[in-house]
Image: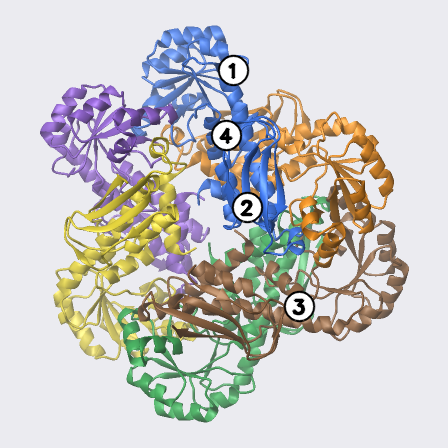
Chain colours: A orange, B blue, C purple, D yellow, E green, F brown
């Protein structure tokens, strides 16, 4: 099963368990209703499809429709989505569907602020693997919706040689060579460097991307100058919203920030349900 | 399978997928290593057992030990946990295990600030169902570790009659009666009220707990006075850290805040791995 | 997946395995048929929805309809349900669907006899956790359909402190206090007592429900008198259909009997299938 | 996963759900205990291995040992099994493990009475597919432990052509021929017959086993005489414990009775747990 | 879940993983298309239903139709199937659906050559358990489609006593007796024999089928003569396409060959997809 | 669960189902044995770890040891692996474990012949996505063991723009640009070309890899000359073992062949099991 469906299933089961002991005895099974989801603060909307899938898994008779699309800026108070169908199912799924929409819109909204702060230069803002466990595909999607780009999805679709790998292999060159013998030709090799000597080693090994880890602005500028387009340059570590313009000005290609996902908070959306 | 194990499995699969294309070709399968997890900011620790279970599921040969316990306040810089075993497994599991620890410690740390702001009176701070989908059991645990209490776990272990239920049933009394005919004698009945008339209706129906939803301080005081101990009183809606002392002073029994979970952010912990 | 769907899936797989080696070579895949389910003894019907879900999971083209409802008393010989659709699917699902209906109607029928024996007083008849493993939700539902009530669904939606817990905690009071610090405010606390001293201890600890375990009628009357409405009273242990009136007369609130589920037998229903 | 493991998992999850809210706050996680299981009525023991597997799945640190074996007759009061390990795990698994043991021993005990009633002749008593959904492998095992034999396990390991198949295929001969073209040479073909004409047809088609469905004793004798050893003879339908000797005397090879499983009740066993 | 559905799910997940990074950004989600599957060599078609199920699981909006049926001989160049629906889903499912069709048609085509080589005598060609792990039901189906028969499906639907069993039981007779006490009356007993003495032992034990393992033609003829119809005769081991006529001439009933499945290769089919 | 573990589980379930009806009644559960796996033809060994995992999942008490390693050339007759433990488990797992080892060694052996035919030049032989459904990770591993390289693992870890994508996007340039806006910087972009005009377009769009699809040797040489190192060159389509040297001589970087996996056959290995 698709990882998103597995997370949805897990979420519905943890909330509903053996049954909704409030709704079940109260409502006739055939009561119908309508729920309207409304933004309660300004936000970048994200998660319409997941919201719909939560209800689809719970009860195929619930229909969701929306005049908005993911990535749209929504002002507080605006209605973004309507769900119609069996009232007991609307009540059972409301909290879970909203929890998804609130967190994904939170990540997209948060990311969009970082993207705005970065400005229009060639440097790209990218995420990391510091995502909420179980949410990798969804949060990486929300980052794209918020206007930033994705780093690799996981350990399987990109090579990133870190300090531990370098130490274990006895240097950057042997590490790169070992990986190059095995990796698919469609995957690039990135190496994490801590100082300019390692940058030189990485260049000598012919890597595709060089990550400058936790370097100060001066060293970043010197490293970028030395690389001189022979590899793409990523800065990582200690990246804050305030530092973005300076990092971009240093001429790097990529700025990665775990904060896009792990410092995002849910935004406020509510669902008003009525019997119809 | 236990919901926590299912989330751990999902998290490992989304990160590792068909394999770690960096580590696998680089390291001999029998290389050994040690990783030390360290706090990089002040925090309330939470998630030691989940951290251990991530590695247990990945490779039973990884052993974790810690001199700390969940709930302990940790100063920045302190080592909190050591994992030892096959080096490739340490590298494969590092990110996922840390992502769990960072979020759970984040919720516990965030909650502990709210608990401190509430002070020592009889009012209890409780969470809600606004948790990260897939994380219900874990985040409710982190809330307890942070010093607050849990509201019901889901729709199955407590009755909470909301406005939609009341409207559907034609009033508080018929709603309460319908549920009472069906609920186990070990479960209490709570009713959400929007004004003092509904508080009176709820009292007349003999409910166990009355939720005052989005009321201002004055109305909360009047409601509490009218209830006069005949039911427990919960306030909900628009609760902020700043309002906690005033709410507590209004004599309520329970203050519920979704912010304990949905406004928490990950705290910073890192893992330094070495070959041994 | 919903626990009932998981049980249905398990049941279909254990019966069909890699295929129905009789039906598959015999019947054209597009043959249509109709099956009529008929009671072969007097019974209280229970399980119409599960019957339908067995076929829904097997083949969405099978349609079930019934003029009866769960809880209805059915005389021997009456038709209770018709299933129509692909004949091979009807033949493949018949036994499994009937096995569900026969057992659930068996529990409902058995329970309804106990309810009749109890009579009209205020005492409620409740079930226990002595259900068929894998069938908890279904059998508890059949108990309600048969006219009795449910005790807690499992270990998670009600507190029941038993002799082992009391011994481990060093007395009723410390046990109650430990649980009270942790339990949600929507869950009540029940304590099992073996004698009047324990009843006094439980009252002193302010518990919500007191279980009188395996006490004789005289002791039950004395305990009930001493409790005097300060807690609800449940009797448990050695409850038989014959003893019900006497127990009810002793003034208890709840009478729990594992026999409702573990002494029930399947009732007889058959399904006659024809090609159409 | 093995169907028995799947049922055990389902059973543990339905009982424990998100946690044991009584035991968890009361007991230190490292408390140890011992539970002794004792028969509370005379019974044929069955299910020792499943009992052990319930605890193995819950907590590998629980060890079970028994001086008895499945199939042994146990007198009321005798201890049959001891489980030792973490006390919280013993308390969490007790009810589920016992529920398995009680039902399986119930089926074995019930079956053993039928076997005794049948006496020592050549006729075999066999079960049917009227088992508790989810329990096929376990209940068929309990039938063997009780001294009877198994009919086919499901639709996949034996051919049984019933009235619906005969009607659909246009007669016994075409039905048998269609199946014979497809079935493995290791599987026998049995045909259900309603009268002597069908018995003749089945003999002419060369079937391996002829089922006499719901025939009276006289017709059974005549059918058996006509078959005269050219096929094995099974009687089915309306078989009661009282009729067993007469059926056996009619010279049939096999007597099948759904009652072995669907009329069995749980027998009484209890588990006394102490802290050690 | 059905084993075929489980294999389909596994196959789709291993190919699509977290997403199709080529198709997703390129195509509008609502683009429609049509794919035509064409044979690129002469083949016996097999797997139309699995092909359809791959797309059904991926996207219910894809419709497949075919004017062919499994078992039909298809000349190179002929169109065998058309799939229509959302273009992104056609692109995502193409490879997986084709991989199934290519292998199953490969097994059916390969088998049909062996069947032709065997000729028209009474000897049946049967498969073995040497199938591709995960593909048992599918490959056994392809063998039937190719014109041969199935041996038992697995260890559960037929008894085959091999040399190891005989050694462990202390001879053929005790082995047969032990199994006969336990097996259902609908299952036959086959014994593997290595020489004529074992054939005699097997006949004396009254087995249903005797397997002559790795015997030369002369010994096969002598064994068949000695058995003289008292049991069916299967030859196994070292069976090649070239030896089939000689084996059939030796008068055996069954010739089993693992090569039907484990020496089959995929045949060539392609799918041309266009936007519509 | 890991895809390999899921395939192993599926394979064991399809073979063992509800039980091994030959072994179970014959052998005492505590009988011990040893099985020795031997090559029956010359082969390149592959699958030792999967073999071990089959038994680990079946019974943790079975221990496998081997003096060989994957990739080793094994002469017919050599013992490659020994498994020891409970005899019933050895008999139950033998066929499934061997079926894995036979197919994986078959793919490795087959691949090694192609690698030898290719010779020592710079051109790499790579596989495709034409693998046995469910076996992607395993067969790609066997290809590496046989000495060739892997193309992308699936649709998620490399961009391959095919004719359908180009048509849908309205040309190579717009297709490449759309993907480039979305893909991670660690993934390369490959475009399939049918003629030299498309090669020029691909070069103009700055792609990383150009696939020459089904071109004749002359056109391949001209395309390679025109590309002149500005992109890597892959040839695909109609690749046979015989054509390998000529393709390599044409100066391409990569030669992809689905035949490495879909034309491989199982090699012969047997397991001799004895009671110990």
Which residue does the image show at 83% across and 33% down from the upper left?
A250
Q: Assess disc 1: are there few (<14), some (14-19) or many (≥20) residues with their C-alpha within 10 Å of its C-alpha.
A: some
How far apart marks 4 and 1 lie (CA) works out to 28 Å
Q: To which residue does mark 1 refer?
A: B117
Q: To which residue does mark 3 refer?
A: F146
Q: CB under 8 Å between callouts 1 and 2?
A: no
Label 3: which secondary element: loop
Q: To which residue does mark 2 refer?
A: B84
Which residue does the image show at 32% across and 41% down from the upper left?
D32
Label 4: which secondary element: helix
Label 1: which secondary element: helix
Q: Is residue A176 left or right of residue D2?
A: right
Residue C253 x %, y % = 21, 26
Q: Is residue C21 left or right of residue D84?
A: right
How far apart marks 3 and 4 lie (CA) works out to 53 Å
Label 2: which secondary element: strand
């Amino acid at each position: 099963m698709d990882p998103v469906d597995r997370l949805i299933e897990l979420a519905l089961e943890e909330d509903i368990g053996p049954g909704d002991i409030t709704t079940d005895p109260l409502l006739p099974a055939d009561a119908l209703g309508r729920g309207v989801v409304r933004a309660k603060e300004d936000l970048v909307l994200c998660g319409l499809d997941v919201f719909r899938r939560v209800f689809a898994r719970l009860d195929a008779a619930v229909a969701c429709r929306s005049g908005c699309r993911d990535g749209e800026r929504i002002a507080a108070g605006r209605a973004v989505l309507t769900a119609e169908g069996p009232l007991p199912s609307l009540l059972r799924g409301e909290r879970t569907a909203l929890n998804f929409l609130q967190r994904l819109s939170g990540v997209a909204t948060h990311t969009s602020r970082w993207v705005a702060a970065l400005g229009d230069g060639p440097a790209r803002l990218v995420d990391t693997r510091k995502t909420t466990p179980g949410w990798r595909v969804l949060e990486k999607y929300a980052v794209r919706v918020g206007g930033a780009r994705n780093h690799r999805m996981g350990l399987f679709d990109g090579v990133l040689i870190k300090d531990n790998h370098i130490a274990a292999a006895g240097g950057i060159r042997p590490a790169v060579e070992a990986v190059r013998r095995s990796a698919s030709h469609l995957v690039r090799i990135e190496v994490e460097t801590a100082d300019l000597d390692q940058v030189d080693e990485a260049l000598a090994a012919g890597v595709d991307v060089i990550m400058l880890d936790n370097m100060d602005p001066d060293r970043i500028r010197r490293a970028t100058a030395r690389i001189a387009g022979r590899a793409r340059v990523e800065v990582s570590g200690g990246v804050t919203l305030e530092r973005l313009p300076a990092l971009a000005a240093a001429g790097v290609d990529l700025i990665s920030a775990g904060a896009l996902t792990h410092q995002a908070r849910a935004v406020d959306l509510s669902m008003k349900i009525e019997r119809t």
